[in-house]
Image: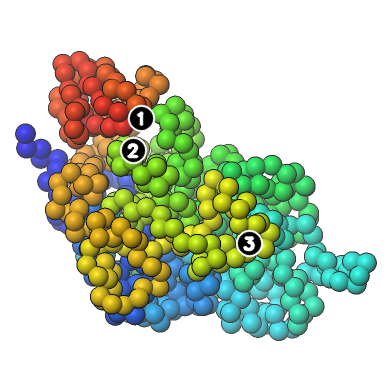
């Protein structure tokens, strides 16, 4: 039966479909591009901005609404751009500011919104600000970073100012600055010194830079580790309190370093900067903390802050209907309209979801169906749509600095016992466009900056485009359906409590109603539905009867009610 909802809308109707009072960022599916690994246009083995522009039609074809680009600013690339050396210029291997402008304009021509990635907590230690700041105690940038005196131990060696720990868990957050004979704060990696946002000059410079990109047309920013920016200005120590958090050990209660009151206030000020423009620019926070803390970023005592915060729980939650259902219920409570939850299954820091699902593509389809039909904003990571998996790379060979830092305090066999290996290279290998030499990412014969995944001959965009049953086509169908349906884009959500293996919910807007049913279990389940008109989206062996639908193990369907 032909299904009008599945006709891929062209860019004009995408625009019309988006013309509602609901802001774009509350109904968007955002596609994360990791520029170094997306598309290499000049054959140097490194992805670049002209390459991204070349491949934008793929994003339109998949049916996403916006693109978020991981940082492409000038950088020594020790943390692949999350160590910025100039926020106003583009790293030469990626292109120029003109290329960035062309990218913004091209996205807009195609009806896509553009989100840049801002690393506000720290710069590279090679940023000229830091070079100056570290040179003496009284230069003009002396107070742009967080410098402090420590003490000395019995052997006469300097000891840090307080007990703050880096976000890499065990190493301390303080690094020694020889020239100044002082310590500087580095909350993440040692070469990423924290900016001192207590200094009004820093905030003025950064907000100015944000305005520059907003003037160029950027629709929003993803804010890198935003919860860490406003540490306690008096450097009060954190209380020692060892425990596990998200599967990793944590030694303290980070009340003076993370999610401070001042940090929430900063979010509100940055929101005000965005709102100086046309009221349609958005901030998406990468923030970690307790649920109440995350909520405070979007609204605190009635004051609006970040538009969205990532809810990372789906990145780590087991594939289990009960667990996922209770997360959905919680997010619905915590982010009631006009707020929306932000769902994510993968990014450049965490394991590929298909790898986590044991390579079972049926499960990946179930998760894709949830991601694309739950209420809120969803974020996909490049390659997720074709089921890219982790490409194993030995820890010692990692380009990623984290395994090398971790190796100082954790033997490799302990590392291997962690729920997740901390070698982010494995999820950053080049995008797989085709099965040819170069994977359609770079010219044949060119060595890419990270190796190609072994499976690129079979797992690639070209092969999946021509296979009607591919994961890519499942994503395309889901997103085409979402696009054509206000109920799925921004309708209310009602979650049903049913069979333990089932996640089922209704999405409704005006007269339009859909029911999404997913079976995450090992047995076929019959789920009662009243009023089902037709399956808007279905899979093999899913049977719709007059008052029920029967789903085989690990399958999902979207039914139109009428
Ligand atoms: C989070 C980013 O996603 C990650 O890739 C980066 O290493 C850290 N923040 C530090 O900027
Ligand atoms: Mg290149």
Between 206 and 159, which is closer to the camera in this rendering?
A: 159
> Could you say whether the residue bearing mark 2 is in a helix, strand or loop?
helix
Residue that label 3 marks = 407
Q: How far apart are marks 3 and 2 (CA)?
A: 34 Å
Front disc: 3 or 1 = 3
Please state the total of marks drawn on the protein image: 3
Task: Classify mark 1: helix, strand or loop.
Answer: loop
* Among numbered discs 3 and 2, the one appearing first in the sequence: 2
The residue sitting at 24% across, 39% down in the picture is 486
Question: Is residue 323 found left or right of 46 in the rendered image?
Answer: right
What colour scheme governs how the chains and residues are painted in the rendered image of this protein?
rainbow
Q: In which quarter of the image is the N terminus?
A: top left
Q: Position of residue 556 (x, y in %)?
A: 27, 32
Q: Is mark 3 on a helix, strand or loop?
A: helix
Residue for point 51% across, 68% down = 397
> Mark 3: few, some, or many residues within 10 Å (few <14, many ≥20)?
some
Q: Position of residue 308 (x, y in %)?
A: 45, 48
Q: Distance between the residues labelled 1 and 2?
A: 7 Å
Residue in the foreground of this view, choosing between 120 and 443:
443
Name the residue that disc number 2 marks.
363
- Residue 120: x percent and y percent? 55, 65
Where's residue 210, x and y in %? 47, 68
In the image, 108 versus 7, the foreground residue is 7
Residue assigned mark 1: 520
């Amino acid at each position: 039966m032909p299904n009008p909802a599945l006709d891929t809308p062209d860019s004009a109707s995408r625009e019309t479909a988006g013309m509602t009072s609901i802001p774009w960022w509350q109904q968007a599916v955002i596609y994360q591009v990791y520029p170094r690994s997306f598309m290499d246009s000049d054959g140097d083995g490194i992805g670049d901005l002209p390459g991204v522009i070349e491949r934008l039609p793929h994003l339109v074809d998949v049916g996403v609404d916006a693109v978020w680009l991981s940082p492409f600013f000038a950088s020594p690339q020790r943390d692949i751009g999350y160590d910025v050396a100039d926020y106003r210029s583009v790293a030469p291997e990626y292109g120029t500011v003109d290329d960035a402008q062309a990218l913004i304009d091209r996205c807009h021509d195609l009806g896509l919104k553009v989100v840049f990635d801002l690393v506000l907590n720290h710069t590279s230690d090679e940023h000229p600000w830091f070079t100056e700041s570290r040179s003496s105690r009284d230069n003009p940038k002396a107070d742009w970073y967080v410098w402090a005196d420590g003490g000395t131990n019995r052997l006469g060696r300097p000891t840090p100012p307080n007990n703050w720990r880096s976000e890499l868990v065990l190493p301390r957050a303080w690094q020694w600055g020889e020239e100044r004979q002082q310590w500087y704060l580095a909350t993440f990696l040692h070469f990423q010194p924290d900016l001192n946002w207590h200094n009004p000059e820093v905030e003025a410079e950064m907000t100015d830079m944000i305005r520059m990109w907003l003037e160029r047309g950027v629709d929003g920013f993803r804010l890198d580790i935003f919860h860490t920016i406003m540490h306690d200005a008096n450097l009060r120590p954190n209380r020692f309190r060892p425990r596990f958090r998200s599967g990793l050990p944590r030694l303290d209660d980070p009340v003076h370093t993370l999610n401070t009151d001042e940090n929430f206030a900063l979010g509100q000020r940055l929101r005000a900067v965005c709102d100086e423009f046309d009221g349609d620019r958005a901030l998406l926070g990468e923030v970690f903390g307790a649920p109440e803390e995350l909520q405070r970023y979007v609204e605190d005592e009635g004051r609006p802050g970040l538009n969205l915060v990532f809810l990372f729980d789906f990145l780590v939650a087991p594939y289990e209907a009960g667990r996922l259902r209770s997360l959905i219920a919680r997010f619905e409570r915590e982010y009631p309209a006009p707020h929306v939850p932000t769902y994510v299954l993968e990014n450049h820091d965490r394991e590929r979801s298909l790898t986590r699902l044991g390579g079972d593509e049926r499960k990946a389809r179930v998760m894709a169906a949830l991601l694309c039909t739950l209420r809120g904003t969803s974020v996909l990571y490049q390659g997720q749509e074709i089921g890219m998996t982790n490409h194993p790379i030995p820890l010692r060979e990692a380009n990623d600095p984290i395994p090398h830092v971790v190796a100082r305090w954790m033997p490799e066999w302990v590392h291997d016992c962690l729920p997740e290996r901390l070698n982010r290279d494995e999820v950053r290998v080049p995008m797989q466009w085709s099965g040819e030499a170069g994977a359609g990412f770079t010219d044949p014969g060119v060595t890419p900056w990270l190796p190609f995944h072994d499976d690129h001959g079979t797992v690639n965009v070209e092969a999946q485009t021509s296979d009607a049953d591919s994961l890519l086509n499942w994503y395309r169908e889901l997103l085409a359906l979402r696009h054509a349906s206000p109920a799925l884009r921004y309708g209310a959500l009602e979650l049903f409590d049913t069979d333990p293996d089932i996640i089922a919910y209704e999405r409704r807007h005006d007269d339009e109603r859909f029911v999404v049913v997913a079976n995450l279990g090992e047995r076929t389940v019959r789920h009662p539905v009243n009023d089902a008109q037709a399956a808007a989206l279905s899979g093999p062996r899913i049977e719709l009867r007059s008052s029920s639908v029967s789903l085989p193990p690990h399958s999902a369907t979207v039914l139109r009610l009428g």
